Image: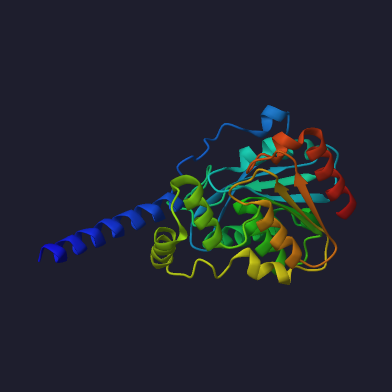
Amino acid sequence: MTWLWLLLSLAVLYAAVTWWGSDVLFHPPKMLPNEVWPEQFGLAYEKVSFRSSDGLTLAGWLIPCKTPTGRTLFLCHGWGDNKGDLLKRVHPLARDFNLFLFDFRSHGESQGNRTTLGMEEGRDFESALEFLKGARPEWTRRMGLFGLSMGAAMAVRGMAEHPDFSCALFEAPFVSFSRVVAQFTRNNFRLPFFPFAYFTIKVIGWRVGADPDASSPILCAPRLPAKPSLFIAGELDRLMPPSEVRFLFEAAAEPKEYWLVPKAEHGKCWEAGGETYQRRLKEFFDKNI
């Protein structure tokens, strides 16, 4: 009986730990506050909102180019970030392009009680694109796509499903849901994939009601249209290592480019790349939109 109670106690403890692990993903521990706004960069903008297909109200910004143009960038932020954090990286592009940014569910100003690292955020991407096509149809005729981290994963999927985008830039995308959760577990808790990450992923799938890997970027990358793409990796990125970004790059169709930013950690290519980063972004979109 003593061994039975011990086994039961361990099972309950492990169930609690894996449930807690799923909550870490659903509720990022380092959510960025809303501290960055377009007016800080002297940008005129319109605050907008729209509904996701499952009824959440999502928030966004329409930022017209300082010189009127039909060229537009559709921008997707990362896990735990928000549209303002992304804007501080790309605001110089408003001199040449219209910018559309929005907050994924449970981020920034958008509604939602959890984030799922892409499983449910696909609804948000689709709703955002549908909204933009209705609100600013003239902006969507010459449109580039940019995503960072989770946003890059969503952009890979979005580009594969919407070849009407002229080009796409993917910064630090992950290969699959399971691989990025395993990497996060190793980096932050020094735990192996099995059993902690393995069962945490199973709990996440059970709670969401879907296979977490079903919409992974590696399944979408081979379906990317033959349109210009730029994959950006940080040399010191421990969450989405260069090898992971390179793996996706290899799966994508030509024409494509791969850029490894020296000394850049995850989400820090803008800081490490400096003027070169800004120039590369502008040149890529200038050439391909």
Image position of 193 (left or right of 238): left
Q: Quadrant of residue 254?
A: bottom right
Image position of 151 (left or right of 51): right
Residue 288 % position (x, y): 87, 55
Residue at 68% in and 61% down: 156
Residue 43 vs residue 22, the one in the foreground: 22
45 lies above or below 156: above
In which quadrant will I find the N terminus? bottom left
Q: Residue furthest front?
A: 3
Residue 26 % position (x, y): 44, 53
Number of marks in picture:
0
The reply to whether residue 44 is in sight is no
118 lies above or below 234: below
Residue 50 % position (x, y): 57, 53
- Identify the colour scheme used: rainbow
Residue 65 vs residue 34, the one in the foreground: 34
Residue 118 % position (x, y): 55, 59
Q: Quadrant of residue 270?
A: top right
The reply to whether residue 140 is in sight is yes
In which quadrant will I find the C terminus? bottom right
Residue at 52% in and 43% down: 109
Residue 48 vs residue 173, the one in the foreground: 173
Image position of 236 (left or right of 188): right
Q: Residue furthest right?
A: 287
Residue at 53% in and 54% down: 183
Q: Residue furthest left?
A: 1
Residue at 49% in and 62% down: 54
